[in-house]
Image (cartoon, rainbow, N blue to C red):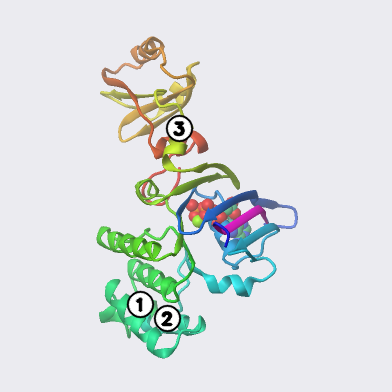
Amino acid sequence: MSDYILKVENLKKEFQLSKTRKIEAVKGISFEVKRGEVFGFLGPNGAGKSTTISMITTQKEATSGEIFIDGESVVRNPALAHKKIGVVAQHNNLDRGLTARENLIYHAKYFGMDDAAANERADEYLEKFGLKDREHDYVRGFSGGMAQRLKIARAIMHNPDILFLDEPTTGLDPSYRAILWEQMLALNKAGTTIFLTTHYMEEPEQLCDRIAIVDKGELKAIGTADELKALIPTSNIVSIKLADLKPDFAEQAKTLPEVENAIIQNDVLLLYMKHEHPDFNQILEWIKTLNTSLQNISLSTSTLDDVFIHITGKEIINNGEGK
Ligand SMILES: Nc1ncnc2c1ncn2[C@@H]1O[C@H](COP(=O)(O)OP(=O)(O)OP(=O)(O)O)[C@@H](O)[C@H]1O
Ligand SMILES: [Mg+2]
């Protein structure tokens, strides 16, 4: 048995937007996911994350490339691969004309579970995800968070070998976010590989064994959180607190010769310097020209957020929207 449950080789997806306009949403990416790991797949909006998941989970056809799940080609034998995967898609794909319980039971039966097992598991998950009192209601009347919880319950009804979660915590309140992760980690412990996309950086930092960062359809980096952090120098981020921080200061700072990138985050101006141990004099001279007083200036150590910004040039903000 191979160490890898998923292997993606030179995977591409083109979309024909009009007669003359085509976009390459996924530009030939290759990576492997180890059996039993929690794998994070991060990237800004439009990076190609959901498109990649759709191809792996047989919902969209690849333009070219290969995908193997458990050694079986998804491209050549989608039906076989389908049995081994669970998917929580980014969009709501529940059957709105069925009740919550029916959504779970029909799904389980489709995957070959018998009545007793399907009903037993439906009871367990309806209880766990706080939907027991709504089990006989039609899904079309569900709130966003309730639908999200049901989507998660449905995806794990049939004990998938690998579970794809495309921004699963978006729309969940903090208590259900905790329940989701408790449940996912229990599944992972029992052997399910987890493939996760999220815009909440603390999730991959805490939960993922390895993380891939994608941008504009390309794989930019892959490794453990510590390996990714080691990709960027730790002492090249200068954080500056000013009495009056104006939005255009970041743009201005980018024109300084030693500054690679600049952003404003939580009322702090962060300068990503080209070199480690930067010379503060040049920065201080510039601050003097801003007509505001300096409250604090310091060197920071890198976080996964910094790696993301360094690699993609974009800030991740915690409402599911990239910038
Ligand atoms: N069905 C489609 N038809 C045309 N273009 C598409 C289609 N689906 C995705 N795209 C395009 O492919 C690119 C990647 O989209 P995708 O949904 O995979 O991004 P994502 O990384 O999941 O982003 P987000 O963080 O916003 O969910 C985007 O430019 C998008 O407009
Ligand atoms: Mg997406």
Question: How many neighbours does mark 2 have within 10 angstroms: few (below 14), some (14-19), or many (20 or more)?
Answer: many
The kind of residue tagged 2 is Asn
**Which mark is in front, 2 or 1?**
2
Q: Residue 96 got which mark?
A: none
**Which mark is in front, 1 or 3?**
3
Q: Earlier in the sequence, mark 1 or mark 3?
A: 1
The kind of residue tagged 3 is Ala
| Quarter-of-image position of residue 156 | bottom left
Q: Is residue 240 above or below residue 281?
A: below
Q: Is residue 44 visible?
A: no
Residue at the disc numbered 3: 230
Q: Residue 103 got which mark?
A: 2
Real-space CA distance between mark 2 and mark 1, rounded to the nearest whole angstrom:
14 Å
- The residue range painted magenta reads 4-14
Q: Secondary structure at mark 1?
A: helix
Q: Secondary structure at mark 2?
A: helix
| Quarter-of-image position of residue 249 | top left
Q: Is residue 13 above or below residue 44?
A: below
Residue at 63% from the left image edge and 49% from the top image edge? 29
Residue at the disc numbered 1: 141
Asked if disc 1 and disc 3 are in contact, CB closer than 8 Å, the reply is no
The quarter of the image holding the N terminus is bottom right
Percent of width and height locating residue 122: 35, 81
Real-space CA distance between mark 3 and mark 2, rounded to the nearest whole angstrom:
45 Å
- Secondary structure mostly taken by the magenta-highlighted segment of the chain: strand
Q: Is residue 161 left or right of residue 128?
A: right
Percent of width and height locating residue 285: 37, 10
Q: Earlier in the sequence, mark 2 or mark 1?
A: 2
Q: How many marks?
A: 3
Asked if disc 2 and disc 1 are in contact, CB closer than 8 Å, the reply is no
